[in-house]
């Protein structure tokens, strides 16, 4: 995460802090066919050991973009943890136009930890082929939920998706600043919403998804964000 002006070397007090989050996660899933429960725990670090400066500026070198000069102002080193629980329900209509399938996937979720603490609810609509193969496209949290796993198929499958989620945010370390030391912070908004849409394609043991996201302002003085994600999952 960076402020809008990445050319400045000095601290920009009214914009979000420089921050990076390097983590690993362990998740457990329970799929009944009608709903999916997900429990996940993530451990990691923020601050210089997360290598945000090196990662961002390496990519900027590759694409010939301006380097971000303000990483000396990033959040301090801190280990972090988040526990997530999500439940997703599903209903499928097989009589969608042109012989396709459609479903709506409502969800609720909770996150608790030093990195994120929030409650969330929303839903996703999908239209396409063989929707029982997964519960939606994956994204880095906080986000609308999807699944890393999918059902491998012999041929080709696809679906379009669109969704909305609202979150009530008690803690976001990337805006609130470090937990155990003084650091840069901004006044976060306690309610944040996401709108997203995209396409998922499954070919044999490979799934490729593209997602475009609109996120409402996350702190006072912020403007809505628009960003995209590309994800590839391969079964072995």
Image (cartoon, rainbow, N blue to C red):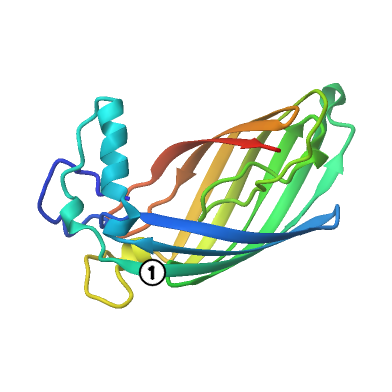
Return the residue nearer the eye: 189 or 204.
204
Residue carrying label 1:
79
Percent of width and height locating residue 65 = 24, 29
- Residue at the extreme left of the image, as rendered: 10
Percent of width and height locating residue 94 = 89, 35
Q: Say whether residue 117 is visible.
A: no
Q: Give the image quarter of residue 60.
A: top left
Return the residue nearer the eye: 200 or 52.
52
Q: Is residue 185 left or right of residue 90?
A: left
Q: Say whether residue 147 is visible.
A: yes
- Residue at the extreme front of the image, as rendered: 236
Q: Residue 50, relative to residue 99: is it above or below? A: below
Return the residue nearer the eye: 21 or 139.
21
Please give the name of the residue rendered at 43% of the width and 38% of the height, measured from the top-left corner. Answer: 227
Indicate the secondary structure of the residue bearing disc 1.
strand
Please give the name of the residue rendered at 25% of the width and 30% of the height, measured from the top-left corner. Answer: 61
Q: Is the residue marked by circle 1 packed among few (<14), some (14-19), or many (20+) residues within 10 Å?
A: some
Return the residue nearer the eye: 139 or 149.
149
Please give the name of the residue rendered at 22% of the width and 74% of the height, measured from the top-left corner. Answer: 182
């Amino acid at each position: 995460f960076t402020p809008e002006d990445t050319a400045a070397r000095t601290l920009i007090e009214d914009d979000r802090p420089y921050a990076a989050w390097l983590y690993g996660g362990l998740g457990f899933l329970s799929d009944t066919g009608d709903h999916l429960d997900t429990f996940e725990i993530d451990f990691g670090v923020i601050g210089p050991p997360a290598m945000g400066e090196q990662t961002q500026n390496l990519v900027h070198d590759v694409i010939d973009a301006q380097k971000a000069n303000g990483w000396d102002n990033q959040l301090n080193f801190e280990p972090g943890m988040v526990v997530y629980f999500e439940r997703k329900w599903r209903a499928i209509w097989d009589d969608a136009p042109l012989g396709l399938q459609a479903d709506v996937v409502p969800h609720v979720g909770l996150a608790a930890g030093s990195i994120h603490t929030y409650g969330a609810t929303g839903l996703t609509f999908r239209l396409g082929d063989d929707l029982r193969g997964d519960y939606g496209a994956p994204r880095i949290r906080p986000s609308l939920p999807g699944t890393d796993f999918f059902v491998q198929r012999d041929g080709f499958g696809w679906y379009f998706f669109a969704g909305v989620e609202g979150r009530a945010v008690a803690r976001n370390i990337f805006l609130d600043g470090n937990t155990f030391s003084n650091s840069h912070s901004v006044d976060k908004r306690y309610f944040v919403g996401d709108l997203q849409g995209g396409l998922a394609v499954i070919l044999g043991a490979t799934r490729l998804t593209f997602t475009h996201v609109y996120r409402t302002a996350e702190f006072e003085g912020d403007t809505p964000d628009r960003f995209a994600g590309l994800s590839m999952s391969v079964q072995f």
